Image (cartoon, rainbow, N blue to C red):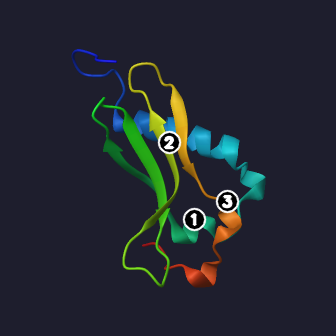
């Protein structure tokens, strides 16, 4: 679908929609205590339809690049979200990851 003009949503609002999608998929009570020590929220790109693609990443020690473990597509005109990637949080252990920041 092609839209004209600038979308009414900015990237900070898209992050909020992504956070809601993440918490629906992974309620806070299920988060490992180390999660945000190793994960980075709020990376984003735009696709050709100008949707936001917001990803949550972490970097495995054995890799030179970050790995997206959760990604959501956010439509900036109507707020529809679609989960594109959702890796179970218990797939990695903290000793396998680099600390963020």
Label of residue 24 in the image: none
Left or right placement of residue 78 versus residue 4 in this view? right
Q: Can you tell which of label 1 and label 2 is closer to the viewer?
A: 2
Task: Where is residue 99? Give x, y as percent.
Answer: 50, 77
The residue sitting at 50% across, 42% down in the picture is 72
In the rendered image, the residue lying farthest to the top is 4
* Residue 54 percent location from the top left of the image: 43, 45
At 39% across and 26% down in the image, what residue appears? 76
Quarter of image, res 51: top left
Secondary element at image label 2: strand
The tag earlier along the polypeptide, 1 or 3, is: 1
Callout 2: 10 Å neighbours few (<14), some, many (20+)?
many
| Cα–Cα span, label 2 and label 3 | 15 Å
Give me the C-alpha separation between circle 1 and circle 2. Answer: 18 Å
Query: Residues at badges 1 and 3 in contact (C-beta under 8 Å)?
Result: no
Of residues 30 and 101, the one nearer the viewer is 30
Q: Residue at x 45, y 51 (%)?
A: 55
Tell me the quarter of the image containing the C terminus: bottom left
Which residue does the numbered mark 3 point to in the structure image? 88
- Which residue is labeled 1 in the image? 36
Quarter of the image for residue 8 reads top left
Query: SS class of the residue under badge 3?
Result: loop
Give the labeled residue for mark 2.
72
């Amino acid at each position: 679908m092609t839209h004209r003009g600038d979308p009414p949503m900015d990237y900070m609002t898209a992050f909020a929609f992504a956070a809601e999608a993440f918490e629906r998929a992974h309620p806070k009570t299920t988060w490992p205590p180390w999660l945000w020590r190793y994960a980075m929220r709020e990376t984003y790109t735009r696709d050709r339809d100008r949707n936001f693609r917001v990803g949550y990443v972490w970097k495995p020690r054995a890799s030179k690049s970050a790995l997206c473990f959760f990604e959501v597509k956010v439509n900036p005109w109507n707020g529809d979200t679609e989960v594109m990637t959702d890796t179970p949080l218990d797939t990695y252990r903290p000793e396998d990851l680099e600390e963020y920041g």
